[in-house]
Image (cartoon, rainbow, N blue to C red):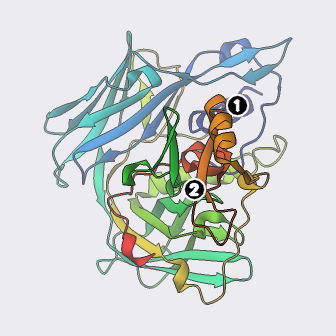
Amino acid sequence: MKRGLTYWIWILALLALSSCLFVACREAFDIEYEPQDTAPILVVEGYINAGDTESKYRLGYAREMETGGSLSLGSNVPVTNASITIESESGTKYYSSTAAAAVGEYIIRHPILDPGQRYRLLIRTGQTEYESEFVEVRISPEITELEWERNDKGIQVFVNTADPDNKSHHYRWEFEETWKYTPNWRSVYILEDGEVRFRESNEFVHACYMSQHSSNIYLGTSEDLANDVIHHFPLAFVPVLSDKMTDGYSILVRQMVLTDQSYSYWKQLKESSERLGDIFGPMPSELRGNIKCTTQPDYHVIGLVEAIRVAEKRLFISRSELIEYWHVVNEFYAGCRLEQGDVQEVISFLTLNRNYLMLQEVQGNPNNSNITGYSYSTRACVDCRVRGGTVDVPDFWPERIF
């Protein structure tokens, strides 16, 4: 039972740290336990970014909780007192900063790393020390193309790549989606100190940009093919009615090449997460990374240290590129209502109700251009930032094409 318990606790811990990093997250469940399995489990997330000037890591403790003779996974606890070091095989070291240590996030700044060297990770938490094996730098070939196709269910994005040297074989992908969206109505007026005025250009809140990181594990291999080629591998999918295509969509794909060991690790983790809800299902051997605790050999560690030079490519899809009209249904704005009233009535109401915003003028007499009133609605229905987006246009956004 101890072997099975250890396996499932490790898998659940990694999922908890990653905030449901994988799609098949499940609610916690209780299982029988053995007292010796209650040591803290260090979870290490991140990779040595050999092609950039900083590497990012997140550390957390996953703890078992005893509840009436059973065991369930406790809340993941950020590790706030750690130091992380990248060490080259020649002895050069790069140390982490503590800027975000309060939430368990660490940044290690370094130059572009020499692909001819091997590197490892050293972690210290209080008096406990961990170290990884030395790993070689894996350099990804370029992403040759990102493609997309529309079908009756939505838009599918595909990635193509090839290694002419036939050395890569195993690939993993992550991506970040960014899209522009707008609420139902646009506010052109603002009420300030009892006076109505036009919004300045930097005060408009009708267009926002939202970003979202991938949450699945995407793995591909050319191991059984004659050539080291990945063709038409499916990544992101935008379902019909999604507001990701409201007014422009972008995806940045990051491609990483894996060793045989790391490919096996990620493959096993993917398979395990997909059947996590069935504890009585088939169970592979324990998930093993390449990090160990040197001061307490019986302490478990979840994580795999990799040194990677990432390949990136960005794709834009304009709504105007879609041959058929893309209908958007956004439940967030489903209950929004447009109100209007006389000038003084609206000013008085908005002065007392700060959760409403003025929209546009109302001209009650078609033969007279004088403003007779204003329209308004709740802030959530007007200010796009309420949903969590930002009005700041991303540096990469080609505004003119949308």
Q: Is residue 46 left or right of residue 8?
A: left
Q: Is residue 222 above or below residue 120?
A: below
Q: Is residue 291 above or below residue 215?
A: above
User: Do the residues bearing badges 1 and 2 touch, measured as CB atoms within 8 Å?
Assistant: no
Q: Position of residue 103 (x, y in %)?
A: 46, 24
In the displayed image of the protein, which residue is found farthest to the front?
367
Q: Is residue 97 above or below residue 357?
A: above
- Tag in front: 1 or 2: 2
- Mark before the other along the chain sequence, 1 or 2: 1
Q: Residue at x 43, y 20 (%)?
A: 102
171 or 371, nearer to the observer: 371
Q: In the rendered image, which residue does mark 2 sit on?
A: 217
Secondary structure of residue under mark 1? helix
Q: Position of residue 236 (x, y in %)?
A: 58, 67
Q: Is residue 314 left or right of residue 93?
A: right
Location of the N terminus (image quadrant): top right
Q: Which numbered dot is residue 311?
A: none
Q: In the rendered image, which residue does mark 1 sit on?
A: 3
Q: Residue at x 54, y 25 (%)?
A: 300
